[in-house]
Amino acid sequence: MKEKNQVREHWGGSLGFILAAAGSAIGLGNLWKFPYVTGQNGGGAFILVYLLAVLVIGFPVMVCEISIGRSAQSDAISAFQKLSTGKSGVTHMLGLFLMLGACGLFCFGKYGLAGIFFLVALVIFRFGWATVGILSVVTPFFILSFYGTVGGWTIAYFFKGLFQQLNFTDAASAEQTFATFADSFGPAVFFQLLFMGITGSVIWFGIKNGIELASKFLMPLLLVFILILIMRSVTLPGASAGISYLLTPDFSQITPHSFLAALGQAFFSLSLGMGAIITYGSYLDSEKNILSSSLMIIVADTFFALLAGLAIFPAVMAMGMEPSAGAGLAFQVMPLTFNSIGDHLGWLWSAIFFFLIFIAALTSAISIAEGCVTCLIDHFRFRRKNAVFWTILLASLFGVFCSISVFNWNRLPALQKALVWAFGASDNSLFDLMDHFSSNYLLPLGGLGISLFVGWQWGMRHALTELRKGGSEVTDINFFALLAGLKDDPLSKGTHSLTLSLILGILIRFISPISVILVFLYNIGWLSLK
Ligand code: TRP
């Protein structure tokens, strides 16, 4: 499987990179999760908090990931190895700390967690900061397992729409249709494998001819589709309630919980915390402007989340349904809504809607898998085709277990018993477990590692050198001069002015790690603010 050193493939252009990274960010997190999380957290006011989280945490971590990747020009594992300078005191301390934690957990009978702590401590002792990079070969399998399952549902529902099998007109049969489909595992597994196969076949063709080409074609298509859906949605009778629900912030709904929920959502939606963006950044060449690319990716992702809200809430309200309906919102409520229009074209709208989610999920799944594929190629010297084959095969196998146990454990009782023995409590199903474990544990930890690494190990000096390549006119702008429209005024430049790079440094070193720690503590239940 050895391959000779080759010239590293790069994105054809800035636009290709931005579209691919935006394609990674825009996915089920925007079109399926964002509307229902917003619905459960009170609408407009939550959106404001979300925007703050994106700006204060999402933006700096995105910049860190792209800078690490581009500077190292390699997969995530090698990137951390290349960029860390000899000092390993901190990582040894952390390893020791985890070892002690493992002993404590073992004494309390938490064998599973103790095992994990022990293993992580060993990995940290051995690999130091590269442990953060190792997440990019571990996390994809957890995320892809449930992501592929939902991706499969979108294909299945696309066909169901086309073949007029979504013609139900009441909530009970919508629910029934979904439950029957997801629980009868034959078709669900078939479509999950199909989704993974399509994902694999795009990555097979590499960066420029695979991912970039697909993104350039699919992302504009996505925009067109969602605009059509919004037009349909906002012209339904009664839709204006949904629009005002989104645009009227009710601050009494803001609790510490919604603040933290917004942080978590920002993380997942922007594809941060597992090296996916490090990987995409490693295919970027040095004339490209990292700061402005990051900004565009983030704006595009947020824009799509808001568009998804605008497509879904007016429809939900017009149907007299609850915006807080939860994860079933997309698969049950939308076909029902389309059928209620009464123009006998419900099947077509449903088909369009699920095709749209499928495209978004595909370009995201590609990026999740590519993190692992690039590691196998760069670090373990696989050929691309072999790397893709093994990654997709393994992730699909994990995914099969997820799709046969979506609602409950009854097809995997032995696994459930083992998990209960090791960890005590367990989720409703393997599907839920994978979702929670990756979103609540792995991503925040990865994000924390990334911002600490850039802020305190690699150092802002190096990061800034990387940012200035292709972007010096942006990094050194006086922030207030920029706001005032005076960025080109010679007198507004000065050595003591508040430049964008200074703000970024403070965000990276303090604000984002502290916020991520808060999210993490909240997610594992050690912090509760009521
Ligand atoms: N951001 C994608 C979404 O919103 C999911 C995703 C793609 C992702 N790549 C990722 C999440 C890497 C975390 C890490 O659906």
Image (cartoon, rainbow, N blue to C red):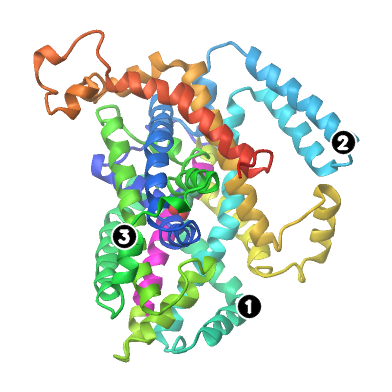
* Residue at numbered disc 1: 186
User: Which badge, 1 or 2, comes first in the chain's sequence?
Assistant: 2
Residue 379: within the magenta? Answer: no
Tags 2 and 3 touching, CB below 8 Å: no
Q: Of the numbered discs in the image, which one, if any, rests on residue 258?
A: none
- At label 1, the amino acid type is Gly
Could you say where residue 44 lies in the image, as x and y percent from the top left?
Answer: 37, 55
Q: Residue at x 85, y 29 (%)?
A: 103
Q: Do the residues labelled 3 and 1 touch (CB within 8 Å)?
A: no
User: Nearest the camera: 259 or 96?
Assistant: 259
State if disc 2 and disc 1 touch (CB < 8 Å).
no
Residue 246 at x, y percent in the picture: 34, 60
Cα–Cα span, label 1 and label 2: 40 Å
| Numbered disc 3: secondary structure | helix
359, 395: nearer the viewer: 359
Counting other residues with Cα less than 10 Å from the Cα at mark 1, is it few (<14), some (14-19), or many (20 or more)? few
Give the total of numbered labels: 3
Relative depth, front residue between 273 and 15? 273
Label 1 sits on a secondary structure element that is helix
For mark 2, what is the residue?
Answer: 106
User: Relative to residue 414, is residue 494 drawn left or right?
Assistant: left
| Marks 2 and 3, the one that precedes in the sequence | 2
The residue identified by callout 3 is 307
Please tell me which of labels 3 and 1 falls first in the chain.
1
Q: Nearer the viewer, mark 2 or mark 3?
A: 3
For the record, the magenta segment spans 350-374
Q: Which amino acid does label 2 sit on?
A: Phe
Q: Which amino acid does label 3 sit on?
A: Leu
Q: Depth-wise, is mark 3 or mark 1 nearer the camera?
A: 3
